[in-house]
Structures are given as structure tokens and as C-alpha cells.
Image (cartoon, rainbow, N blue to C red):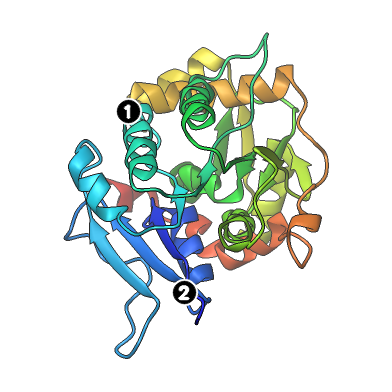
């Protein structure tokens, strides 16, 4: 009897990591079902005109019935939804729907476990979801990356228009990992024929970098001087709320991450080479590929 291809459901397929997961799964020996929250959302990986192993469905993450429908016939699930106050409810709904449909494995994008004296609210959200996984799934793996290189795209405005990076990190370093490397590892766990034994896997990138060093790297790829301006946590929070117009939870999260790196030094090197068939991408590669995002723009354009 011919072996059936596994069906993999990908939640968060339009996000940075989720899109990379979809790209990694394209053409592999499996069937892929990307879940869209909005049926009008553009497909992150376009459908081929001919036969393809990729398809899309849409579902309201607040609807258990819709989630059960999109999980029908699935073998494995990649769990990632938009970070925010609704994340706990949404991901618990997905886990319950997956369990009720007999999904045998969930690979979840989680967060590093934060211990006292540090506090990160988003990590607490992930902990509640992870505990639900422990209680309701026999086979799962929580991937816990440190900071994503792609998160630097939050800083494009002040870099483009003012040549400045604002933060409350001081000289502390943060460990960065490329989202595509995380996707590569996630796909390995999604596709492995063996039962996953590791319930929790911390992922660290090739180097820990402080904001002063990042300013120098950005200066090199943009051809102009980028300066790091260190401010107090309160000043940073107020800038994020009043100038960047971020929601309170996200502004608080950014400040908490800076404080976390100060209180608990992050790893200086990677631990993911053994989880892939290559060495991880370095920050210089990411910046070179995306230097257009940080190029100078005249201030008057921001007023249009």
C-alpha cells in the first residue's frame, strides 16, 4: 500500500516565520494547509497553476467549529498566531480543535522561559499556552527563539529619517536569530518520521549584539552614520506610545525585552547548527539583504 503524505496545517502562515515555514514546506513530501484569518488575505506563497502541495483555508480563531473544520484530516500542526492579548485564547482554541480532530503532533513557536527578577508579559502568555499543550497533547515541541533579526524592522522609521536607534538596553547584548532559520528547524520537527522527544527547545543565533554594535553595522550597510541613543525605560515607553503610536502591550513588551537582556545576559553563540544541515545566518547577511529598509529618507516625506 502506498504511504500517504502527511497533512500539515500551518497557523500564522502569513507572518514572517509562518511564511518562511510555508516556503520551506513547498514541494516537500507532504500536503500543506495554510490557515488565513481573513479569506481576502493575499496568499503568502502563491499557488502554482499546476499540481501543488499547498492549499489555503480561512477560519475565525474565536470559532471552535471553524477551527475544527480546518483541522480535519490533519496529522501535524504548526502553531503560531499574532502576538497580542488575544493570543492565549486563540492558541488554546486551536490546540483543543487539533486534539478533537486527532492531530498527533503540534510544533509551537513559543518564547524563552523568563525567571525572576525579570518579567516579560508575553512570555507569561506563552507559558499559559505551553501548559495547555502539556496537559492536552502527547507529542509536541515548543521552539523558544531569542530575538529575531527581523524585529529590527520595527526601528526603520527613526533610522530612515533621523539616523538614530532608541532603546533602553545600555551596553547589554541580545542574541539574534533569523526567522528563516527558525522556520527551517520547525519544518524538520514537522516532517520527522520519528516521535519528537524534546518538548522544549531553546534556539539561539550566532551572535549576541548590543545596540552600539548594531548602529555600526547599520552605518556600514546604509553608508551613513547611525547613532544609538540610550534612554530610560520610561522615556522609551513614552516614545513608543506617543510617537510611534504602538499599543500599550507592545510598547511594554519592547521595554521589558531590553530590561531582560540587562538582568539576564543572553547566549553569546548559537545552538542550532546541529538542528539544521548548515550554519545559521549571521546579522550581516540579514542587513545586506534588507538594507533598503534602513536607507535614508528625507523628513518631509514622513509628513505627506
Q: Quadrant of residue 281?
A: bottom right
Residue at which label 1 appears: 89
What secondary structure is found at the residue carrying circle 1? helix
Question: Could you tell me residue 70's position as x and y percent?
Answer: 27, 54
- Of the residues tagged 1 and 2, which is closer to the observer? 2
List the single residue furthest toward the front.
1
Which quarter of the figure has residue 142?
A: top right
Name which residue lies at 34% across and 48% down: 101
Q: Mark 2 Cα within 10 Å, few/some/many (few <14, many 20+)?
A: few
Q: Secondary structure at mark 2?
A: loop
Q: Residue at x 38, y 71 (%)?
A: 45
- Seen in the picture, residue 40 relative to 126 is either above or below; the reply is below
Q: In the image, is residue 89 above or below residue 56?
A: above
Numbered circles on residues, count:
2
Residue 195, image x and y in percent? 65, 52
Residue at image position (55%, 38%) is 138
In the image, residue 190 above or below residue 153: below
Q: From this viewpoint, which residue is outermost toward the bottom?
A: 50
Residue 167 position by quadrant: top right
Q: Which mark is residue 4?
A: 2
How far apart, in angstroms, are the residues tagged by discs 1 and 2? Answer: 33 Å
Q: Is residue 162 visible?
A: no
**In terms of sequence position, does the residue under pointer 1 or pointer 2 come before the other?**
2
- Outermost residue to the top: 117
Disc number for residue 189: none
Image coordinates for residue 186, horizontal then vertical, percent: 59, 55
Q: Nearer the viewer, residue 131 or 261?
A: 131
Amino acid at each position: 500500500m502506498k504511504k500517504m503524505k502527511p497533512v500539515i496545517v500551518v497557523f500564522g502562515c502569513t507572518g514572517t516565520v509562518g511564511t518562511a515555514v510555508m516556503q520551506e514546506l513547498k514541494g516537500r513530501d507532504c500536503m500543506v494547509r495554510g490557515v488565513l484569518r481573513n479569506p481576502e488575505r493575499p496568499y503568502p506563497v502563491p499557488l502554482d497553476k499546476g499540481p501543488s502541495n499547498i492549499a489555503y483555508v480561512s477560519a475565525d480563531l474565536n470559532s471552535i467549529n471553524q477551527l475544527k473544520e480546518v483541522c480535519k484530516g490533519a496529522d501535524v500542526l504548526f502553531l503560531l498566531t499574532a502576538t497580542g492579548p488575544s493570543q492565549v485564547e486563540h492558541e488554546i482554541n486551536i490546540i483543543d480543535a487539533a486534539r478533537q480532530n486527532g492531530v498527533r503532533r503540534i510544533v509551537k513557536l513559543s518564547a524563552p522561559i523568563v525567571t525572576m527578577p525579570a518579567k516579560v508579559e508575553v512570555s507569561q502568555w506563552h507559558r499559559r499556552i505551553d501548559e495547555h499543550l502539556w496537559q492536552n497533547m502527547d507529542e509536541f515541541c515548543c521552539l523558544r527563539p531569542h530575538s529575531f533579526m527581523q524585529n529590527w524592522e520595527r526601528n526603520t522609521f527613526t533610522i530612515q529619517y533621523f539616523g538614530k536607534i532608541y532603546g533602553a538596553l545600555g551596553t547589554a547584548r541580545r542574541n539574534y536569530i533569523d526567522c528563516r532559520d527558525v522556520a527551517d528547524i520547525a519544518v524538520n520537527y514537522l516532517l520527522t518520521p520519528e516521535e519528537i522527544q524534546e518538548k522544549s527547545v531553546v534556539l539561539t543565533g550566532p551572535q549576541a549584539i548590543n545596540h552600539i554594535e548594531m548602529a555600526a553595522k547599520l552605518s556600514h550597510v546604509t553608508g551613513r552614520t547611525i547613532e544609538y541613543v540610550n534612554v530610560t525605560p520610561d522615556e522609551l515607553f513614552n516614545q513608543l506610545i506617543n510617537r510611534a503610536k504602538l499599543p500599550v502591550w507592545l510598547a511594554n513588551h519592547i521595554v521589558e525585552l531590553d530590561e531582560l537582556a540587562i538582568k539576564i545576559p543572553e547566549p553569546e553563540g548559537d545552538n542550532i547548527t546541529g538542528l539544521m544541515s548548515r550554519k545559521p545566518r549571521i546579522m550581516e547577511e540579514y542587513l545586506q539583504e534588507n538594507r533598503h529598509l534602513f536607507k535614508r529618507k528625507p523628513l518631509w516625506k514622513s509628513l505627506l
